[in-house]
Image (tube, helix red, strand yellow):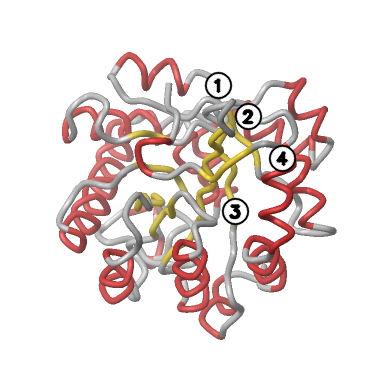
């Protein structure tokens, strides 16, 4: 039997030079399936040119950015006071109380989604291979609807896939890695795959990679890969620490630990022992 392809997607491309450098190094080494780009970053235009030269089959996606210390590409009104994107907690609160269902914020969100897709396409000259969200913001009611509508309007059915962060309770408990956090993210993803399918938008068929950015990352990755099935997507966050990253995100050393492991012979050995291979291009299984 052939090895099972597992999709490894690095988040946060273009957030800082150290993240982009790490992603491109791992792409060249065949250790990643793709990366999601944060196009509101002022680094994006220059880093897009580097991403365009990545090896064939390496997927470039939009990492929809509505959080993370950056500024939106356009006016988000009361959703981005002072022109600064709010934290994920603020978005979750707005979503839970139904504020994002109102027509005015829905229009603002839809316009920002369109601007970010335009900026991606302008830089790379093509549609993204996939779309996901920084801090999983694309899962939230009030955001997922405008995103799915824009994807269906803009792209032919099946052309661009969407990250589904759903995972079954059994899989989460079997991995034993940050089960409360993984369970919350899986709960937020309920119904997303079905809504995407109704619009002809494919999704991955399994999700892992949630942890507390602490402890032994290689051991955690081995748990993520245990009993992997075709369609599994594992998110990773490799990066070299730098001043730009430190100003935006306190999680610097965990990114370096991920990079060192993913670039190491130990990761290749762990894949081989699990009879897995990093999925690339058309080998990425979607549902």
Q: Quadrant of residue 217?
A: bottom right
Q: Position of residue 55 (x, y in %)?
A: 35, 60
Which dot marks residue 5?
none
Give the labeled residue for mark 2. 186
Query: Callout 1: helix, strand or loop?
Result: loop
Pointer 1: residues within 10 angstroms few (<14), some, or many (20+)? some
Give the labeled residue for mark 4. 224
Q: Nearer the viewer, mark 4 or mark 1?
A: 4
Q: Compute the Cα span from label 1 to label 2.
A: 7 Å
Q: Position of residue 245 (x, y in %)?
A: 55, 76
Pointer 2: residues within 10 angstroms few (<14), some, or many (20+)? many
Q: Position of residue 117 (x, y in %)?
A: 24, 50
Which dot marks residue 190?
1
Query: Callout 2: helix, strand or loop?
Result: helix
Q: Compute the Cα span from label 2 to label 3.
A: 17 Å
* Residue drawn 43% across the image and 60% down it: 85
Q: Quadrant of the C terminus?
A: top left
């Amino acid at each position: 039997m052939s090895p099972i392809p597992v999709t490894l997607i690095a988040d946060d491309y273009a957030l800082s030079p150290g993240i982009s450098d790490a992603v491109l190094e791992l792409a060249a080494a065949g250790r990643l399936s793709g990366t999601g780009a944060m196009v509101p970053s002022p680094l994006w235009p220059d880093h897009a040119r580097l991403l365009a030269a990545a090896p064939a089959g390496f997927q470039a996606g939009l990492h929809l950015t509505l959080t993370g210390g950056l500024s939106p590409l356009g006016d988000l009104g009361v959703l981005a006071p002072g022109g600064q994107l709010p934290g994920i907690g603020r978005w979750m609160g707005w979503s839970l109380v139904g504020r994002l269902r109102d027509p005015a914020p829905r229009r603002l969100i839809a316009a920002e989604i369109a601007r970010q897709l335009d900026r991606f396409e302008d830089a790379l000259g093509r549609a993204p291979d996939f779309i996901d969200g920084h801090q999983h913001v694309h899962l939230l009611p009030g955001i997922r609807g405008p995103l799915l509508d824009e994807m269906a309007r803009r792209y032919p059915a099946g052309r661009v896939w969407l990250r589904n962060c759903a995972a079954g309770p059994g899989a989460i408990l079997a991995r034993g890695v940050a089960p409360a956090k993984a369970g919350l993210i899986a709960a937020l993803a309920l119904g997303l795959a079905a809504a995407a399918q109704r619009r002809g938008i494919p999704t991955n068929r399994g999700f892992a990679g949630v942890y507390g950015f602490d402890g032994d990352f290689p051991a955690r990755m081995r748990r993520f890969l245990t009993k992997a099935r075709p369609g599994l997507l594992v998110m990773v966050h490799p990066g070299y620490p730098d001043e730009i990253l430190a100003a935006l995100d306190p999680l610097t050393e965990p990114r370096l630990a991920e990079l060192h492991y993913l670039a190491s012979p130990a990761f290749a050995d762990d894949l081989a022992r699990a009879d897995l291979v990093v999925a690339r291009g058309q080998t990425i299984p979607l549902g």
